[in-house]
Amino acid sequence: MQDLIARLLSELGEDPAREGLRDTPKRVEKALRFLTSGYTADIDEVINNALFTVDYSEMVIVKDIDFYSLCEHHLLPFFGKCHIAYIPQQRVIGLSKIPRIVDVFARRLQVQERLTLQVAEIIQEKINPLGVAVVMEGTHLCMAMRGVEKQNSFAVTSAMFGAFRENARTRMEFLELIKHRQVSPTSVEAMPAGLTCVGD
Ligand SMILES: [Zn+2]
C-alpha cells in the first residue's frame, strides 16, 4: 500500500521524497488500516459477554454516539451522531458495547443509508428485541469540501424495525427524545442507494 500512496503523491504533482512527505505513505497506510478495521472485526467478540437476560420491556435509548466513516464514492470522511433505541423482550446488551457496534460498521467504506441499516440489523439479529430504531446525522466532507450542493452535505437517515415501524406512538416517543419529529420510519428504504453522497 505504501508504494501506491507514494505513486498517488507523485500523480498529484508532489515529490514523495521531500521531508514532509517522506513518512506519509506509512502514516496513510496505518490510518487507512484503522479506518477500515471494521472489515476484520468480529462482532461476536465485540459484544462478548455483554448480553444479559431481563424481564422488562422499557425502551432503551443511547443518544449522541459519535461516528466517523468513509464515503465509498470519494474515500472522504462523513461523521456525526448516531441515536439508537430498542425495546428488549428478553435480552439487553451492555450500553458500552453499543458505540463499539457502531464503530465496527462505520470503520468501512460506507454510504450513510447502509451504515444505518446495518447497525439496526445487527441489533435485531443479536438481541431479537421487540423493536429497534437507528437515526444517524452525518456531515459529508465529499459534499462540503468540494462546494457541491453544500446544503446537502448534512444528512439524516433512519432504520426502524418492529414496534418502531408498526407503532406510531413508540416511534414518536423515540423521535421526541432525540428531537427528530420529521424522520420517517421508512426513509432508508425510500432513498435510492447513496443519496447522501451524490455528484461525481
Ligand atoms: Zn462521497
Image (cartoon, rainbow, N blue to C red):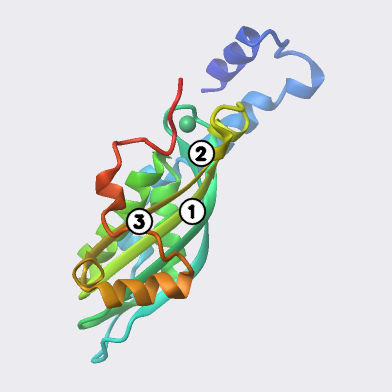
Q: Is disc 2 surrounded by few (<14), some (14 to 19) or many (20+) residues within 10 Å? A: some
Q: Amino acid at mark 3?
A: Ser
Which numbered disc covers residue 152?
Answer: 2
**Residue drawn at (68%, 26%) of the image:** 24
Element carrying mark 3: strand
Which numbered disc covers residue 158?
Answer: 3
Mark in front: 3 vs 2: 2
Which numbered disc covers residue 123?
Answer: none
In front of the other: 195 or 54:
195
Counting residues from the start of the chain, the first of labels 1 and 3 encountered is 1
Q: Position of residue 137 (x, y in %)?
A: 48, 53
Report the residue that reaches farthest toward the right: 19
In front of the other: 1 or 85:
85
Quarter of the figure with residue 62: bottom left
Q: Amino acid at mark 2?
A: Asn
C-alpha distance separating marks 1 and 3: 9 Å
Q: Is disc 1 surrounded by few (<14), some (14 to 19) or many (20+) residues within 10 Å? A: many
